[in-house]
Structure formats: C-alpha cells, structure tokens
Image (tube, rainbow, N blue to C red):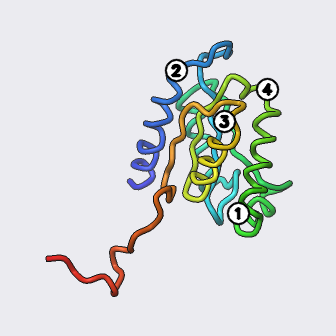
Amino acid sequence: MAAVLLCFLLAGPVLLAASSPVSGSNNGTVPLVLWHGMGDSCCNPLSMGAIKKMIEEEIPGIYVLSLMIGKNVVQDTENGFFMDVNQQVSLVCSQLAQDARLKEGFNAMGFSQGAQFLRAVAQRCPSPPMKTLISVGGQHQGEEVKPTDPHVPEQS
C-alpha cells in the first residue's frame, strides 16, 4: 500500500510538469533530472532506480537522467556524505550543460538533500534552464522541531 501511495505522490507532479512540451523535443515531453538523497545512489533498484523506471513507464519516451556523482554507485553514495556541496553542484552544472537532450530545458525532482542541491543548480546554473523543481522532502526552510522532541512542551 505504501508503495502505491508513493507512486501516486511522485507520479502526479511529474505528469503535470511533463505535460508542457519543450520546443523541438521529439516526443513532446520535458526531460526530467533526478537527484537522490544522502545514503542513496542514482541507480539503486529499490529506490531511485525504481522511481526512474516508474516514471519512464508512466510517461513513454521521456528522457530521465538520474544523477551519479562519481564513477560508480559506491562513489555516488560516498560523495553524498563527503564531497563538498559546491563541488557537487558544479559537477552537475557541467554535466547538465553537456547533455544535448537537456538544451531546451528540463524539470528536476530532488529527494531530501538532492532537492536542496537542485535548488542550488536552479540558482547558479542558468543553462540549460530548469523549468520546474519538484522537492520531495527537501529542507528548504530548515527544520524547526521533531514532533517527538522531549524538550518541546506539549500544546494544549
């Protein structure tokens, strides 16, 4: 049940964002760039790999780029913890600029840390243009308190 709910939550915004075609695109879809969160990788078949596959099945012909920061899945996961954020954003900006399939623009979907890093891409890298940023669990306004924090007094 949770997997079905997750699919609806993720597919809905992507389907809406992908509905406006990029001029010159072969199939009328807007490419999608995915960036995973900390501790995950671009291609994990139980997480980002499954999300990429689901989107490709729901939107036939869409180009989905799941970002890998490093030369393999292990480096990708490690870099999520240890590589400087600015260096990661610069690498992604270069990667996006060199991808001819993104030249007319793309939508972006980031998960947790990946959402924050894609926000930096949107702010720092004007080309190719990011059309829509979908943030899933991104901490854009910080974190106030945990609901179960024992130091927070109960409200009546």
Side of 153 where 100 appears, left or right: right
> Is the residue under label 3 in contact with that under label 4 (CB below 8 Å)?
no
Q: Earlier in the sequence, mark 4 or mark 1?
A: 1
Q: Earlier in the sequence, mark 4 or mark 3?
A: 3
Asked where in the image residue 22 lies, by quadrant, the reply is: top right
Name which residue type carries label 2.
Ser
Disc 2 to disc 1, C-alpha distance: 32 Å
Q: Residue furthest left?
A: 156
Picture disc at residue 23: none
Residue beneath the point at 81% across and 41% down: 94
Q: Residue furthest right?
A: 71
> Is the residue under label 4 in contact with that under label 2 (CB below 8 Å)?
no
Q: Residues within 10 Å of mark 4 (few under 14, many from 20)?
A: few
Q: Disc 1 designates what residue?
A: 80
Q: Residues within 10 Å of mark 2 (few under 14, many from 20)?
A: few
Name which residue type carries label 4.
Ala
Q: Name above or below for residue 84 compared with residue 151.
A: above
Residue beneath the point at 73% across and 51% down: 89
The location of residue 132, given as percent across then percent down, is 54, 34
Q: Name above or below for residue 107 compared with residue 82.
A: above
Q: Nearer the viewer, mark 3 or mark 2?
A: 2
Q: Disc 2 designates what residue?
A: 20
Q: Disc 3 designates what residue?
A: 64
Residue beneath the point at 52% across and 20% down: 20
Disc 2 to disc 4, C-alpha distance: 19 Å
